Image (spheres, rainbow, N blue to C red):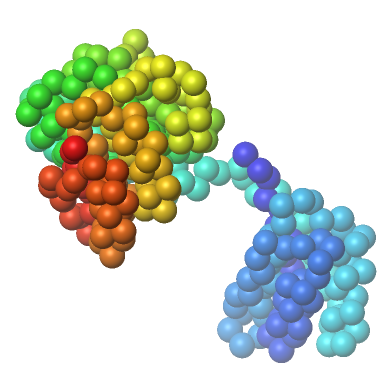
Amino acid sequence: MTTTWKLSFSVPLATAEIFADTLRDAFDPECQAVATAEIEEHITWSVEAYYEIRPERAHMEKLLSGPSAESGYTIDDLLIEALPEINWVAKSLEGLAPIQTDRFFVHGTHDVENLPAAKIPLLVDAGEAFGTGHHGTTLGCLRFIERECRRRHPQNALDLGCGTGLLAIAIAKLTHRVVTASDIDPIATRVTGENARANRAHPFIKALTAAGFGHPELTARGPYDLIVANILAGPLVGLAPAVAQHLAPGGTLILSGILAEQEQMVTSAYRAQGLFLVERLPLDEWVTLRLAG
């Protein structure tokens, strides 16, 4: 994880923006963000700047000498410090309530003592990859997976753009068949493997790192009678020919990551490949689609 460096100091209210503008406009070093905040009402303000690379003290003192001369104020509390390495994705999702569907109970480690007996538990803690069940796109896919597995028993499924691997693990739990899970991001495929082990589903998950179908094993393991792709509308449209090529005759396609206003664009792209909308599930501003040939 990248360390973030913070530079901070306090100045009189009237000079705060002069110093802040100097930091914002500097190219060496280039800051990620600058913030000012009131410390003492109408008197003293703090100025903070954030950097990916540690700023050198002597260089920053020289940079700030300009606004010091302009304002007549000399900084006497300049501080440069490394911020704690915090995974803000995980931090923001800590303590989220579990999600329940007809068959599944999606939860974090903090809820392992509260598992309902009638549900299939899916343990996914917030982390570096997308997909904890709380987003409308992931939830929509889970519900369609449940419906599909009630309708028939998929024998060879693919989770394309697997993120945390939640959807692949859900399919494996329902079918007890090996599910292929692929993602362009190697962090996602690593996390998928970790989550598969945490859910005791690792014998049924084959994780591959690939852009689209750009891995020979993805082709070798096909065709797939169920493909789930929870990515974004643009990539879904671009992948339409390859997805249609790797979907088995009579197979089912579940698509999500689609905003309601993008639905027509996506369905048109797949209609051109001979795949037609069977069912749609809107959740918030997102829509999940089930298609078949």
From what the image shows, is residue 108 above or below residue 281?
above
Q: Position of residue 200 (x, y in %)?
A: 31, 14
> Residue at the location (42% across, 22% down)?
219
Residue 187 sits above or below residue 95 on the image: above
> Can you see residue 279?
yes
Report the front residue among 163 and 278.
278
Q: Residue at x 31, y 36 (%)?
A: 244
Say if residue 232 shows up in the picture.
no
In the image shown, does 263 or 275 lie closer to the viewer? 275
Q: Is residue 250 left or right of residue 234?
A: left
Quadrant where the image shows the C terminus? top left
Residue 38 spot, x, y in % from top left: 60, 78
Is residue 36 shown left or right of residue 76?
left
Residue 135 vs residue 182: left or right?
A: left
How many numbered discs, if any?
Answer: 0
Q: Residue at x 63, y 71 (%)?
A: 35
List x then y, in percent, for residue 64: 86, 73
Residue 43 or 14: which is nearer the viewer? 14
* Residue at (81% x, 70% y) in the render: 26
Q: Quadrant of residue 101?
A: top left
Looking at this rendering, what residue extends furthest in the top direction? 203
Instruction: Assign the N terminus to one quadrant of the image.
Output: top right
